[in-house]
Image: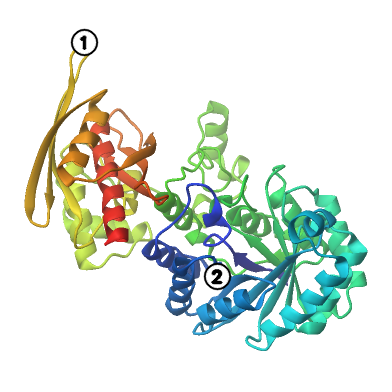
Amino acid sequence: MRYIKIFDTTLRDGEQSPGCSMNLSEKIEMAKQLEKLGVNIIEAGFAIASPMDFKSVQAIAAAVNTCTVASLARCTKGDIDAAWDAVKEANHPRIHVFLATSDIHMEYKLRMTREEVLASISEMVGYAKSKCPDIEFSAEDASRSDPAFLAKCYTAAVAAGATTLNVPDTVGYSTPQEMADLITYLRANVIDIDQVDISVHCHDDLGLAVANSLACIQAGAVQVECTVNGIGERAGNASLEEVVMALKTRGDFYGAQTQINTRQIYKSSKLLSNITGALISPSKAIVGANAFAHESGIHQHGVIANAQTYEIMKSTDVGIPQNTMVLGKHSGKHALREKLVSMGYELADGELDDVFARFKALADKKKTITGSDIEALILNRRHTGIDSCQLISHVINAGDGMPNTSCVKIKRDNKILQEVAIGSGPLDASFKAINQMLGIRVSLDSFSLNAVTDGEDAIGEAVVKISDGTGNSYTGTGLSTDIIESSIRAYVNGINKMIEATA
C-alpha cells in the first residue's frame, strides 16, 4: 500500500470560513488534538495576515512536537520572512508559498504576465529555500490553468528547491476525471517531479472535493490537503474524516493508507464544532449523529443479526463512544472518571472536579445520564479568565400581553451584580440586563439552539455570536436542560471571551 500524507489546513483555510474564527488558546487546543489525530502537516495560519495570526502560528509551532508546522506565504519576501519567523522554532518547519497561474487570476488579480509569474516563482521559491529546507509551492487555481504553462510553473518551482507541489482546485470547478487527468499530465511533463511530493487541495463548491481528492490519489498524488468537518472558504474543503475513512474502508480499491489514528476522528470533529459553534449536520458522513443510527425495522433486524449488513465500518473505529454505562445522581466521581476514560477523555483532577460538579447538577434534573450528556459537559467550554463573569441566578417573567422582564445576577471580580430589564422576549430582556449591569455595548449577531441529547429532558446547547462594534466577533456556548438558562450562559460565555480579548 502507498502512504498518503494528510495536510490539515483547519487552522488556516478552515478558519477563513465565515463564523469559524478561533482565539489563540482555542487554536492551540485544536492543534494539539490534530497532533493526537496523527496528521502529518498542520498549516497553522497565514503569518503575514495580522499580528495575531503571526502569534498563533508561532505558538502552534512551539506547542506541537511530531507534526510539520506550515505557514502560508504569497510570493513576496515580506510574506516569506514572516512565515519563516513564525515557524522557525518548530521541530519540523515548512513554508507554503503560493501564486496564481490561471489566465483569469493573472490578468484581473495579479496583473502579471506569464513570464513575470514564472520569474516570481523561481525567485521567491528560491528565497524561501534559503531559509527553510521544506518548501511547498501551490499554483493557485491550478485546475483552471493552461496545463502546459502550469507544468512550466511547477518545473520552475522544483528547480528553485520546492519539495512539495500542490495542485489546488481553488474554486471547486473540476471533476474527478479532470483532476486525475491533470495529475497524470503533470507527472509526465514536469521535470524532476518524481523527486518531490504531489499534493492536492480541493474545494467543495460542486460537492466533489472528496471525490476529486481520491481521484488524484489514484492518479499518483501522495498528499491531500483537507480540514476537519470539511470547513473552509465558501462551501468548504475536502473533509479529512471522509478522505481518511474512504482510504481505510476501501483500501482494497485505493491501495493507499494514512497514519491517522481514526479513533480520534470523532473527538476532533466535536471539539472543532464546539470551538467554532458550527453545528455538524446529523447526516454528515462519518461523524454525523445519524451516521451509525438505525431506525428502520428492517435495518435494525439486519444489524442485530450482523452489523455488516448495514454498516461498512465500525463506529468505534472513528471514536464514537458506545454508551453502555448508566450514570445518575447517585454515582460517584470514581464511576464518572471510569466512564470518561472509556470514552477516551483523560482529565486532570481539577478538570474532573469541575465536570463532576456540573454532572451532579445535571443529574438532579435528569433521571439517567447518557454518554452524550457527559460528552456535552466535557466539550462545553468554561471561561477561566481573571475578569470572567459567572451566572449566579436568573428570574424570568414572561407571557402574552404582559411585559417580558428578566432579573439576572452575575458574579464578577468577587462582586455580585444584579439588574432588571424589559425586552421583547425573555432572552432579549436577559441580554439587556447583562449589558446594563456590566456597562458594555454588545451586538447579538446570531443565535441558535440545538438539542445535543435525546428525550424530553434533553440538554439544550445554545450558541451565540456577539460583536463589540469594532469588527471583532466572539462565539459563546452554554448548556442546560433549561433552554433559557443555556442561552444566558452562552451570552455570558461570549462576553467573557470579549473581555479577555480586550483586556
Classify 10 Å Cα crowding around label 1: few (below 14), some (14-19), many (20 and above): few
Question: In the image, which disc is placed on residue 325?
Answer: none
Please tell me how many numbered marks the rendered image carries. Answer: 2
In terms of secondary structure, where does tag 2 sit?
helix
Classify 10 Å Cα crowding around label 2: few (below 14), some (14-19), many (20 and above): many
Residue in front for this viewpoint, 231 or 302: 231
x and y percentages locating residue 484 in the rendered image: 24, 32
Please name the colour scheme applied to the rendered image: rainbow
Residue in front for this viewpoint, 37 or 462: 462
In the displayed structure, would residue 222 be above or below residue 356? below
Question: In the image, which disc is placed on residue 401?
Answer: 1
User: Which residue sits at x=27%, y=32%?
Assistant: 483
Question: In the image, which disc is placed on residue 48?
Answer: 2
Rounded to the nearest whole Å, what is the CA distance between mark 2 and mark 1?
Answer: 55 Å
Q: Is residue 329 visible?
A: no
What amino acid is found at the position of numbered circle 1 in the picture? Gly
Residue with the most extreme front position: 111
What amino acid is found at the position of numbered circle 2 in the picture? Ile
Is 438 on the left-hand or right-hand side of 253?
left
Image marks 2 and 1: residues in contact by CB distance under 8 Å: no
Quadrant housing the C terminus: bottom left
x and y percentages locating residue 1 in the rendered image: 73, 70
Residue with the most extreme left position: 415
User: Which residue sits at x=33%, y=61%?
Assistant: 341
> Which quarter of the picture shows residue 112?
bottom right
x and y percentages locating residue 468 in the rendered image: 34, 47
x and y percentages locating residue 96 in the rendered image: 65, 73
User: Which residue sits at x=73%, y=66%?
Assistant: 99
In terms of secondary structure, where does tag 1 sit?
loop
Residue in front for this viewpoint, 76 or 134: 76
